[in-house]
Amino acid sequence: MLPRGRPRAMGVAVLLLLLLLVIGFFLFGRDPEYGLGTTATLDGDLYGSRNLSASSPQLLLPPKCEMLHVAVVCAGYNSSREIVTLMKSVLFYRKNPLHLHLITDAIARNILETLFRTWMVPAVVVSFYDAEELKPLVSWIPNKHYSGLYGLMKLVLPSILPLSLARVIVLDTDVTFSSDIVELWAFFGHFSDKQVVGLVENQSDWYLGNLWKNHRPWPALGRGFNTGVILLWLDRLQQTGWEQVWKLTAKRELLTQTATSLADQDIFNAVIKEHPELVHPLPCVWNVQLSDHTLAERCYLEAADLKVIHWNSPKKLQVKNKHAEFFRSLHLTFLGYDGKLLRREPFGCPNHFPPGAEQLQQALAQLDEEEPCFEFRQQQLTVHRVHITFLSYQPPPPQPHDVTLVAQLSMDRLQMLEALCRHWPGPMSLALYLTDAEAQQFLHFVDMSPVLSVRKDVAYHVVYRDGPLYPVNQLRNVALAQALTPYVFLSDIDFLPAYSLYDYLRASIEQLELGGRRKAALVVPAFETLHYRFSFPKSKAELLTLLDAGSLHTFRYHEWPQGHASTDYSRWREAQAPYRVQWSAHYEPYVVVPRDCPRYDPRFVGFGWNKVAHIIELDAQEYEFLVLPEAFSIHLPHAPSLDISRFRSSPTYRDCLQALKEEFHQDLSRRYGSAALKYLTALQLSRSRA
């Protein structure tokens, strides 16, 4: 028989046991991805308590329309391409307005100002800061890292960012997001009063000092922290005397270390080693590091989802990793993603239109989709994303008579580039009309070409495809605007200039004394061959022999002779000196003009009258046309473009082109008054003969 008090004791024991089970369930029994807290352990643990997903129910997101601030240091051509992919991944997932703070050199600023202005993404503000101002603040620190001085600038961001800016996410250009950046921003709400920086633990043994013999890394807490993704609480940094703290630490360590190996990361870690209370450890999924000696597998194999991928090896996407293909696929998704699809507003937030976007939307809304020329009208209003100097470029040294070849092309003319580079040894400015995916194919094409990869005086400008018609004159204007020499040769990609033309043009410009007030357009006579293989003439005498033999013809003599009739090829055969010719209807020669010449009329898209309108503009501005006696360029055969096929087959297409011509002449009359009458008369005369 049990004692009378026993049941009551057992009841209490059961209640206590149940209570312990409930507490144990909340503390230990739940998935570590949804833990309650992030107590920092400093023993090198790569997962466990730090591997908490930002999708945790306990993570309080900021208000839906709160502006998030992101800072990136970006310098040079390669980083300017990397930041585009980074921003695509951020914009794809984001739901909040963003303010980008870009610390750039002159090259990156020139590229990115154009890119973001033409990208026209709603609810994105971009501010630029001059990296030159930060160089003196970090130039005293020896750095072995490939990033150079730019890799140290995150240390001094508080000195250049606005004082009113309290918090900012700082990113390397080689990271890719796979989640909404607002979830990362929400970790600011978990900082203690003393914490000023949020970082993910370094996912390698670098700071443990055992990678090779005599490996002496900078001091760090355990494995240390990686600075590819940083949460900075700026006003708290100022209060802690951050500038003095990191400088004293760096100077002390440099007494025994010859330089930093990992740039700013070494100094951040040395400071945190002394002041661990400053750091808020972030879950490992917010900086999955794919370095050469990565241990990130311990993180991502345990995680429910990944948030940020960091290509922190110098090899970038070529890094060796057994799961590299998975990560590359994620990155390549954004690399080839159509950036125009990101021109979308965050739902439920006040409209933050980029400059000109609201007026553009209104103009597009007024178009009648049933109108026969709707495609032409829409294409004229389309703002294309433009990435100037897509590849590394070394501008030519200034020369008073130098000439840049200007042309445009699409993917189907890419094979012309190598031959063009062999014929033209001077600078070139080329606009390429490509999709995002084609831009990556183009990049690979140049890298693999022994001819193109060594030419650093060719500036390639990518204009991203948008719309059904080829924006030929917009492309020409992009290439023309980026030419840096005093003169430009306005050509087409399917023409090969004479081997001697570059030197001959420079000499002609000097001899004709074109500088000053004289406005002249030097005409380069155009020829064509119908043969895919032929021996290119090395001189005018050889060209005339081929012309007489029927291997060459004057350009479009059998289809559109009026296009080049004014060049007067009969006179050119015997000419020993430049001679002047008069404008005539439909004249469209290839010319050399000053860089500040009139721009092409962007209303002409697709096929027809795009060059004719430009030559009319030159004539209206009183340029004299001088034919050069030793100059020539030869058109190579190729399959007809889609636009010329539509022009030939569609009466509606031709009617729309005629409407554009008439509008162009009306604009000429408004600008030039009675002087424009001759162009209208010539147009009417040619129509009556057609």
Image (spheres, rainbow, N blue to C red):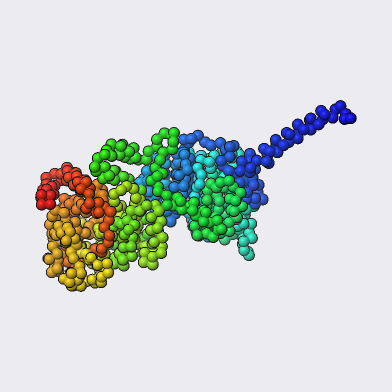
Number of numbered discs: 0
Residue farthest to the top, as pictured: 4
Rendered view: 471 above or below 447: above
Quadrant (top left, top right, bottom left, bottom right) of the N terminus: top right
Q: Position of residue 112 (x, y in %)?
A: 39, 49
Q: Compare residues 443 and 327 and report the one nearer the observer.
A: 327
Q: Compare residues 464 and 31 and report the one nearer the observer.
A: 31
**Camera sees residue 7:** yes
Residue farthest to the right, as pictured: 1
**Camera sees residue 624:** no
Q: Residue at x 41, y 44 (%)?
A: 342
Q: Residue at x 17, y 59 (%)?
A: 559
Which image quadrant is residue 213 in? bottom right
Residue 549 relative to residue 469: left or right: left
Q: Compare residues 27 and 204 and report the one nearer the observer.
A: 27
Q: Position of residue 418 (x, y in %)?
A: 33, 65
Q: Residue at x 29, y 49 (%)?
A: 469
Q: Position of residue 299 (x, y in %)?
A: 60, 50
Q: Position of residue 537 (x, y in %)?
A: 23, 71
Rendered view: 430 above or below 16: below
Q: Residue at x 29, y 45 (%)?
A: 379
